[in-house]
């Protein structure tokens, strides 16, 4: 967190938290009262001071005040950058991919050392190109169809995302199960 934020916390430790004002979309956009935040400096400030409490509720520490975040999907939105490097919607770089899955709604999710996050849907086609068959070969179109039909397994090599780790079988998960499985709260309340 920013030094000024930490100093404000020390000076005013008992400022009440705010709920229902700030949101994060499934594409990593910050919303203030359901309106997209257009100011880049404000988005970056929120991203630098974004954290999680012991309940799994994510918040933006705005000086001495916690502003809890309503999550449309997951706490992190992962994006593929140049050469398929992985970064979050805040620009944080995960060091390790621990799990990969396709959800029952067709979206991809990753669990990294930072936490659970969707792969931005605009990067889904590029993400599919990172998948391999069990022998580690690029996934062919018939192989993709067999996997989507549930007849084959596919794998993700985290090294191709610029992170460490061994190849991971891409699991199948229900989107509704993500908060319990990964310990986050979509709609924080007092």
Image (cartoon, rainbow, N blue to C red):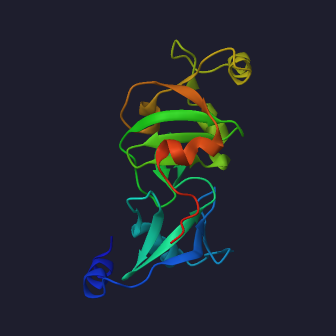
Which residue lies most toward the bottom here? 11
Q: Quadrant of the N terminus?
A: bottom left
For the residue pair 46 and 177, the one nearer the viewer reads as: 177
**Numbered-mark total:** 0
Q: Residue at x 46, y 72 (%)?
A: 46
> Residue 143 in the image: x percent, y percent?
68, 17
For the residue pair 9 and 120, the one nearer the viewer reads as: 9
In this rendering, does residue 33 appear at all? yes
Which residue lies most toward the top here? 135
> Residue 105 in the image: x percent, y percent?
72, 40
Q: Is residue 133 above or below residue 156?
A: above
Q: Quadrant of residue 152?
A: top right
Q: Quadrant of residue 56?
A: bottom left
> Residue 75 in the image: x percent, y percent?
51, 56
In the picture, measured across the screen, residue 64 lies left or right of residue 126, that is left
In this rendering, does residue 81 appear at all? no
For the residue pair 15 and 104, the one nearer the viewer reads as: 15
């Amino acid at each position: 967190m920013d030094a000024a934020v930490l100093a404000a916390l020390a000076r005013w430790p008992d400022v009440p938290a705010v709920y229902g004002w700030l949101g994060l979309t499934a594409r990593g956009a910050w919303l203030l009262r359901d309106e997209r935040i257009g100011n880049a400096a404000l988005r970056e400030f929120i991203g630098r001071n974004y954290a999680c409490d012991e309940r799994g509720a994510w918040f933006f520490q705005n000086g001495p005040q916690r502003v809890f975040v309503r999550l449309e999907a997951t706490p992190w939105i992962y994006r593929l950058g140049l050469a398929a490097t992985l970064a979050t919607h805040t620009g944080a770089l995960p060091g390790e991919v621990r799990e990969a899955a396709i959800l029952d709604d067709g979206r991809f999710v990753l669990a990294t050392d930072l936490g659970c996050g969707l792969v931005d849907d605009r990067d889904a086609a590029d993400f599919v190109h990172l998948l391999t068959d069990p022998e580690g070969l690029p996934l062919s179109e018939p192989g993709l169809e067999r996997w989507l039909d549930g007849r084959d397994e596919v794998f993700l090599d985290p090294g191709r995302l610029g992170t460490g780790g061994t190849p991971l079988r891409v699991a199948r998960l229900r989107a509704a199960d993500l908060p319990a499985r990964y310990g986050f709260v979509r709609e924080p309340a007092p």
